[in-house]
Image (spheres, helix red, strand yellow):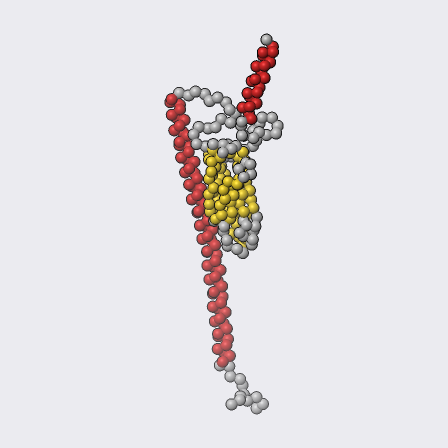
Amino acid sequence: MSPLLFGAGLVVLNLVTSARSQKTEPLSGSGDQPPFRGADRYDFAIMIPPGGMECFWQFAHQTGYFYFSYEVQRTVGMSHDRHVAATAHNPQGFLIDTSQDVRGQINFSTQETGFYQLCLSNQHNHFASVQVYLNFGVFYEGPEIDHKQKERKQLNDTLDAIEDSTQKVQNNIFHMWRYYNFARMRKMADFFLLQSNYHYVNWWSTAQSLVIILSGILQLYFLKRLFNVPTATDTKKPRC
């Protein structure tokens, strides 16, 4: 009887091993604890130095939807070119999509589980830094993914309907949050543009006022010299 039990144990072990090998989710080096994945979405602003590059990694499961949007809010330096280059790579390091503009989006479906790389390059500016607002993350349509491969409990029709309605409300709130971030990106970009124009107008008005005052002083000086009659003496008389 023991050989039969031993054979059955080997079969079960082989099935468990094959089931684990089909997973695309990476595991950490110690034990079966999953790696630190962070949050599902982020939004913040960064400064990229002249000719520099900044990269970020976002964890995502397969069958998800990845979104990445950016907008250059302002430039600091001698150049005023606001174009940046954005790239997205899959966990294997292959390029998914690129975008080179003042503002842009990269959206795609995640085909495998892992850390996706997002990079922003300020290659167009060699004499100015750029401030870029980022908004990226991943969301999943439908029911929540079971990461530990546990069997889902059977629910009755009422609970299923409540769950579906709740999921739809959460998805709608999430998309509303994305549109709000788009509006906030444009608002900050417009604010920095208005602030730059305000300082430019003030500086130019001050410079023109100084030029007008200086030209008036010079004109008065030269006009005064035209009517300046030298005093005639015996040794110094005006010429005819």
Q: Nearer the viewer, residue 219 or 44?
A: 44
Q: Residue at x 57, y 20 (%)?
A: 14
- Determine the residue located farthest toward the top in the rendered image: 1
> Is residue 124 shown above or below 180?
below
Q: Give x and y (percent) for residue 170.
A: 42, 32
Q: Nearer the viewer, residue 28 or 93?
A: 93
> Is residue 37 shown above or below 193?
above
Q: Residue at x 53, y 84 (%)?
A: 230
Q: Give x and y (percent) for residue 226.
A: 49, 80
Using the rendered image of the protein, determine whether residue 72 is visible from the camera's viewpoint: no
Using the rendered image of the protein, determine whether residue 124 is visible from the camera's viewpoint: yes
Q: Residue at x 52, y 49 (%)?
A: 130
Q: Quadrant of residue 4?
A: top right
Q: Residue at x 56, y 32 (%)?
A: 36
Q: Give x and y (percent) for residue 142.
A: 43, 30
Q: Nearer the viewer, residue 140 or 183?
A: 140
